[in-house]
Image (cartoon, grey):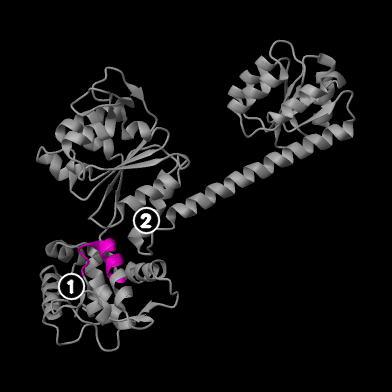
Amino acid sequence: MNPYPILIVEDDESQRRIIEYNLKQKGYRTTAVESAEMALKELQKSEYYLLVSDMKLPGMSGTELLSGVKELRPEMPVVFITAFGTIEKAVEAMKLGAYDYITKPFDRDEFLLTIEKALEYRRLKDENLKLRSELDGKQAFSDMIGSSPAMLEIFETIKKVSGSDATILISGESGTGKELVARGIHGASERASKQLVTVNCAAIPKDLLESELFGHVTGAFTGAVKDKMGKFVLADGGTIFLDEIGDLHLELQAKLLRVLQEKLVEPLGSNETIPVDIRVIAASNQNLAARVKEGRFREDLYYRLNVIPITIPPLRERPEDIPLLAEHFTKTLSQDNDVAVDKKAMALLKLYHWPGNVRELENAIKRALVLKRGSMITIRDLPPEITGENVPRPSEDGSGKPGNHSLLIDSEIKLITEALKTSGWNQSKAAARLGIPRHVLIYRMRKYNIREP
């Protein structure tokens, strides 16, 4: 049985039976109806790969049927069967988007060949859409770099959630790449053809933010000389990214909650609401759960936003990503493809604690590219905060293992060792005592070769 279902529209019963018989003989699955109105109802209920219709139908005409099909199933090809006297209308239908037409009385082989070509056209169109979707998904991830377990888990989460409209809350320190994750989710979603609208809630004064988010009508306040479309309406059909949501004023939090619940926006100064179809992604570098306890963030809004949480770890907790990121920035920020970071400089980059995270690393590489004297970025090209006396220095071989002269490293080794001894060499307990994640402790133990006696 051919897997592609075909819908037949023919008001003449004998002709309808002939068409059905020929298609079934070739193994096609068919459904036959008598009118255009019945065909459109059938298309609303079931999925079909191709529509074959008489050009002249009672009630709604063939061209009107074509218009309805293009609204319901724009990807579905339509083949018309027409009498000699209505060829002109069939040609007109092809200009409007029909795939092809055949004339009555039709030759069986010619008819089946046309059907086969129409189905092949549909298959190629579907494959093209699938390929484009896959390429769009890859493009969405192109700016996110990382091979650490934490980043690989984030990539996997993005793939899973991009197909839904669930609200997402992205947490992480400044500079970790929260907006990149939001762009990745939007770019891999079905909303990718629409806008991703970004609003930084911390960068806009409170008095202006409400108008920025929800819009206003003329005369809503002093200076409102014309209507303004808010970001939520601008994002209709797409995604809105609310960055630094933790800084949103409590009064605006209540209004945002209503928009999330009802999908309705009420511009300032207006009594009318505007329906919006949006996906909401929020981000914060603050601990929103703690702000809820402090009474500075609405609990109901927090749970409404935190449907799918994504936490981006700081760069110091995933040092294995630093060489990849450094290489990426040297390639994208330099016109010279041969530029690289030498071993000693790379070892120093891996030892630095990166309070500004990926953004700080990008700026450090940008600075080094300007100051470098050859084709290699060396220690002398790095910023002073990375190369200062208070920063661990790599050994002469560039391995990244510290030399014995570093008092800071000696202190860190002693602190880690004491915490492990006190915890009976239980890594989870020692990490909790030190106030760091367990995988960071394990990384430090390996780096400093700290082992249980």
Label 2: element kind: helix
Q: Measured from the top left, where is residue 275 in percent x and y? A: 37, 24
| Residue located at (70% from left, 37% from top) | 3
The amino acid type, in three-letter code, at marker 2 is Glu
Question: Residue under circle 2?
Answer: 153
Residue located beneath label 1 in the image: 385
Instruction: Indicate the position of residue 308 as horizontal and vertical percent values.
Output: 32, 42
Q: Give the range drawn in magenta.
A: 353-365
Q: Which amino acid does label 1 sit on?
A: Glu
Could you say which disc has been placed on residue 318 in the image? none
Quadrant housing the C terminus: bottom left
Name the spot of residue 35 as percent of width and height, x first.
71, 15
Residue 308 appearing in the image: yes
Q: Number of numbered discs present?
A: 2
Classify mark 2: residues with Cα within 10 Å, few (<14), some (14-19) or many (20+).
Answer: few
Q: From what the image shows, is residue 312 above or below residue 415?
A: above
Q: Nearer the viewer, residue 235 or 7?
A: 235
Q: Which of marks 1 and 2 is nearer the N terminus?
A: 2
Q: Is residue 298 visible?
A: no
The part of the image, by quadrant, that contains residue 334 is bottom left
User: Is residue 140 shown in magenta?
Assistant: no
209 shown above or below 64: below
Q: Is the magenta stretch mostly helix, strand or loop?
A: helix
> Is disc 1 placed on a helix, strand or loop?
helix
Quarter of the image for the N terminus: give it: top right
**Mark 1 in CB contact with mark 2 (< 8 angstroms):** no
